Amino acid sequence: MTKTAVGLFENSGLVDGVVRDLESNGILRKDIRVLSEPVEIAGEGVLTPRTDFEVDLTHMSRTKGRPTVKNTSTSQKSSSSCAIRRLMVMLIYVGSLVAPSASHGVELKEQTQRTWDAYLQAANPRMGSQTAFLWADQLPERLQRVRGGEILVSSVGQQNPKPVPSGLIHDWIGAAFIPDARIEDVLSAVRDYGNYKVYYKPTVVDSRSLGSDGPCEKYSMRVVDKEVVAQTALDMEYETCYFKIDERRWYSITHTTRVQEIRHYGQSNEQELLPNQGSGYVWGLYSIARFEQRDGGTYVEVEAIALSRDIPIAVRWLVNPIVRRISRNSMLISLQQTKEAVHLTEEANRTSKSPTTADNRSRGEFASGVTIMNRFAPAGKP
């Protein structure tokens, strides 16, 4: 029985070097297969899963003296989200072989927190200084694609995730257009915290409003993805402040106020860890969302920034490309689910003939997040 590791590469020049490194570490050339020619992924566009090479870890498993488990490589027939999550499960196993300390708990360090705070301070002026209100308006081709129905997701900066002391910062932006939707209905959906567990399932398993204070609203979510990190959940509390520019444009700023890991989730020995302790898959989330009604519908954009633990050097070459794809795919899925939530809200409003919720305090902005290292950060819920 064998264990399979899968690596995805954006830069085709990396593959030959990785194969040589694997051979130098004792893996036989016959146990390494290149399944398809790597293709560089554009900076924006709908993600499609691509398996660039596969490594049979039979030799490594035997040298480490560990039992091996049979896993097949990603099938092109699988959905993109399931395929990517399975890849992450494989990589977590590889990490335990190469760097066993990676599975131990980590704690958010003061230097990491300071670097995170400084990054957000620098990001705030950048987020608000763009000439056009919408990111989509900066390029005519980009606007045309979004208006035509594509959900676009792009990395902010060439290096993503960005290494910081004892951590990583993930920064992504996404845009979608919802035809025939009024901005009131969009705000009604994204501020309906109690139904996040319906709109964003199966990742969000519980959600609730925690009240409001002036223009800011607070809410909580419990998120879990058993395929990525088995038996682990995150309880997260958010604060969102939203602002009306005019009748057709709104924006909001969201940040986490508490991130708490639940170990052995759903089992008799379930344990709530202290905030900023645990696996470190998500330490903090921050986002800004923009909404504009025009062109026969409403545009929704989110820039989502997340802080996570670092990736051990021994497996960074293998994990970083997967992290990027998980983050991109998570944003895509979240924006698609938001579009569906708006349609549900429109139907409910028509049925009940109740006023829309520009003043409903039980509702708030996109719950931020990219994601990031995994779908724990329902990556970019506005």
Image (cartoon, rainbow, N blue to C red):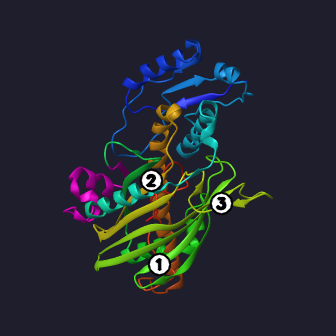
Instruction: Report the amino acid beneath label 2.
Output: Thr
Assess whether mark 3 and mark 1 are in contact (beta carbons under 8 angstroms).
no
Residue at image coords 51%, 41%:
311
Residue at point 30% right, 64% down?
Answer: 124
Identify the mark nearer the N-term, 2 or 1: 2
Specify which label sits upstream in the sequence, 1 or 3. Answer: 1
Q: Quadrant of residue 200?
A: bottom right
Q: Which mark is residue 112?
A: 2
Q: Is residue 349 above or below residue 291?
A: below
The mark found on residue 217 in the picture is: 1
Q: Nearer the viewer, mark 2 or mark 3?
A: 2
Query: Which contiguous range is marked in magenta?
Result: 127-156
> Can residue 181 be seen in this snapshot?
yes
Residue at the left extreme of this rendering? 131
Residue visible at 54% across and 46% down?
81
Query: Which residue is identified by label 3?
Result: 273
Q: CA distance from mark 2 to mark 1?
A: 27 Å
Q: Which residue sits furthest front? A: 110
Question: Within 10 Å of the Cα at label 3, are there few (<14), some (14-19), or many (20+) other Cα atoms?
Answer: some
Foreground of the two, 46 or 86? 86
Provide residue 240's location: percent of width, then percent of height. 44, 73
Amino acid marked by disc 1: Glu
Say which amino acid is labelled 3: Leu
